[in-house]
Image (spheres, grey):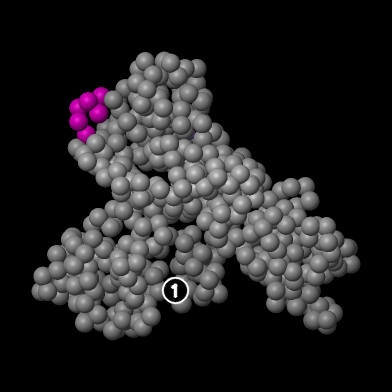
């Protein structure tokens, strides 16, 4: 199998952390040598040395600017689980602190997304780890990022499960921790494996549109730079950002797959010095360009639940295009990109890291744990988790206990098509929790669905009125189209 030769010299890690001390460099070097030796002879599915994976995890942590201890632990994160090295040997070489981080990652173990109960168990493990030391979770997420980016080498049957797990578990956690960039990277790497058709469609739609030309964009940037400096707004820089594919698809679903209704496919990001500069910049922009009514959002005054702060507005550029502009301080930007990691970073850790800030940021994990201790009732814990994590999704079961994940409002028809299009097409009736129900019944979390399949059954046009998933709708339409006008007479009944 072909893989790219990876440069695994520690210098690559140091390059992300210009302020590392000599002692920290020595520590990271030591961890690299230790892990390399421990994994000697082990290969990844791609055929490359196993060490490449743990080194890449270290790189991911360095990109988040984590402290040297965390990077060292990240490089050694699979040593206790997958090699002969013992905890005692690691403690002797690296001390208790780093060993504890590695143990934490090991304890999180190999998470599985198969069945809701076990899924909740995985989340619970994450909360325990997070409440203990949030850095363990950050290491695990960086580990997962490399695994998902090398998913092409994994067996076909496993790919989808791992990718779904990444979207439903790891990316949601990254989001909850405010780590916007990591979340997006996890989702975009997993997207083509979980929803291949939707992925293709999203890429097509993306390529088909041209919301604003490079020329128009350059003109706006130049004009803004001039005017903001005239008004004495201190600009750090102006970037443009392209919406990540997975989040674009999520949004497309909410807007009937109409890309023309999505204003932030490309957005301009203005990074300024201070909060007052944010509002001043906004004033200048609204003075220069007409804003689209109803598109202004002040996430500085009212931050998002995960702590995200920015001003958002969408303007008419005056030559036919519209453009979203996001205004934020450098600090807000770092927090939006790196989230919790920006508070654990090399430059902040040890240097009066604000306990309070950290508590506020990770408080929810502890709260959830505490709350779970009080309420021994499993169902209620589940409900709370779902409210928090699985908004807009329902998790239902086949009679055999396989979990199927559907959008809220889905019906037995959506379920049948999710199993297989041939089951969908032959659906004659459905039972939910053992009771016969109409086919337009909305499914609830943890329902067990049984589909009654008949050879003579076929899709009805009216199913389109109540199915929720694009998959089911598409298959029903396709069936009607392919079976032509003759059948149509029967289908409309
Ligand atoms: Mn690993």
Question: Could you tell whether 159 is left or right of 60 in the image?
Answer: right
Q: Is residue 472 visible?
A: no
Vertical position of residue 158 compared to residue 491: above or below: above
Question: Could you tell whether 183 is left or right of 354 in the image?
Answer: right
Question: Could you tell whether 90 is left or right of 349 in the image?
Answer: right
Q: Secondary structure at mark 1?
A: loop
> Range of the magenta residues?
20-26
Vertical position of residue 66 compared to residue 421: above or below: above
Vertical position of residue 360 compared to residue 48: above or below: below
Residue ranking furthest to the front: 374
Residue at 63% x, 46% y: name it: 378
Q: Is residue 256 visible?
A: yes
Location of residue 283 in the rendering, given as x and y in whole percent from the top left corner: 21, 77
* Closer to us: 325 or 444: 444
The residue under label 1 is: 262
Location of residue 208 in the rendering, given as x and y in whole percent from the top left corner: 46, 71
Residue at 80% x, 70% y: name it: 438
Location of residue 339 in the rendering, given as x and y in whole percent from the top left corner: 35, 51
Location of residue 212 in the rendering, given as x and y in whole percent from the top left corner: 34, 74
Residue at 68% x, 51% y: name it: 403
Quarter of the image that includes the C terminus:
bottom right
Q: Is mark 1 within 8 Å of ligand 1?
A: no
* Closer to us: 349 or 380: 380
234 magenta-colored: no
Q: Main secondary structure of the magenta part?
A: helix
* Closer to us: 270 or 10: 270
Question: Could you tell whether 311 is left or right of 129 in the image?
Answer: left
Pointer 1: residues within 10 angstroms few (<14), some, or many (20+)? Answer: some
């Amino acid at each position: 199998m072909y893989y790219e030769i990876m440069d695994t010299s520690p210098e690559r890690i140091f390059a992300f952390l210009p302020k590392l001390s000599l002692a920290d460099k020595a520590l990271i070097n030591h961890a690299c040598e230790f892990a390399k030796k421990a994994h000697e002879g082990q290969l990844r599915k791609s055929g490359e040395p196993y060490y490449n994976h743990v080194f890449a995890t270290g790189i991911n942590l360095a990109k988040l600017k984590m402290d040297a201890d965390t990077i060292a632990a990240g490089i050694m994160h699979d040593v206790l689980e997958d090699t002969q090295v013992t905890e005692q040997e690691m403690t002797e070489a690296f001390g208790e602190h780093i060993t504890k981080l590695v143990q934490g990652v090991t304890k999180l173990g190999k998470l599985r997304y198969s069945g809701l109960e076990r899924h909740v168990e995985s989340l619970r493990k994450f909360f325990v780890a997070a409440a203990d030391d949030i850095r363990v979770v950050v290491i695990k997420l960086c580990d997962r990022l490399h695994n998902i980016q090398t998913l092409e080498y994994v067996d076909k049957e496993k790919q989808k499960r791992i990718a779904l797990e990444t979207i439903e578990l790891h990316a949601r956690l990254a989001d909850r921790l405010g780590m916007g960039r990591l979340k997006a990277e996890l989702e975009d790497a997993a997207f083509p494996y979980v929803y291949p058709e939707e992925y293709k469609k999203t890429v097509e739609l993306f390529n088909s549109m041209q919301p604003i030309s490079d020329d128009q964009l350059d003109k706006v940037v130049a004009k803004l730079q001039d005017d903001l400096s005239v008004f004495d707004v201190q600009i750090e820089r102006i970037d443009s950002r392209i919406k990540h594919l997975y989040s674009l698809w999520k949004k497309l679903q909410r807007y009937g797959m109409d890309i023309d209704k999505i204003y932030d496919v490309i957005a301009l990001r203005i990074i300024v010095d201070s909060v007052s500069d944010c509002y001043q910049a906004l004033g200048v922009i609204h003075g220069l360009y007409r804003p689209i009514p109803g598109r202004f959002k002040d996430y500085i005054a009212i931050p998002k639940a995960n702590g995200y702060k920015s001003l958002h507005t969408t303007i008419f550029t005056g030559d036919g295009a519209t453009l979203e502009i996001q205004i934020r301080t450098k600090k807000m930007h770092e927090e939006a990109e790196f989230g919790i990691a920006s508070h654990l970073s090399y430059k902040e850790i040890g240097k009066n890291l604000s306990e309070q800030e950290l508590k506020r940021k990770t408080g929810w994990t502890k709260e959830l744990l505490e709350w779970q201790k009080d309420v021994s009732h499993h169902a209620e814990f589940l409900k709370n988790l779902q409210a928090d994590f699985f908004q807009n999704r329902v998790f239902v079961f086949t009679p055999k206990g396989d979990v199927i994940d559907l959008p809220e409002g889905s019906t037995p028809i959506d379920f049948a098509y999710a199993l297989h299009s041939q089951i969908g097409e032959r659906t004659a009736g459905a039972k939910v929790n053992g009771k016969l129900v109409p086919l337009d019944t909305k499914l609830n979390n943890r329902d067990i669905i049984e589909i009654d399949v008949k050879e003579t059954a076929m899709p009805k046009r009216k199913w389109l009125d109540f199915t929720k998933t694009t998959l089911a709708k598409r298959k029903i339409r396709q069936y009607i189209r392919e079976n032509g006008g003759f059948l149509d007479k029967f289908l409309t009944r």
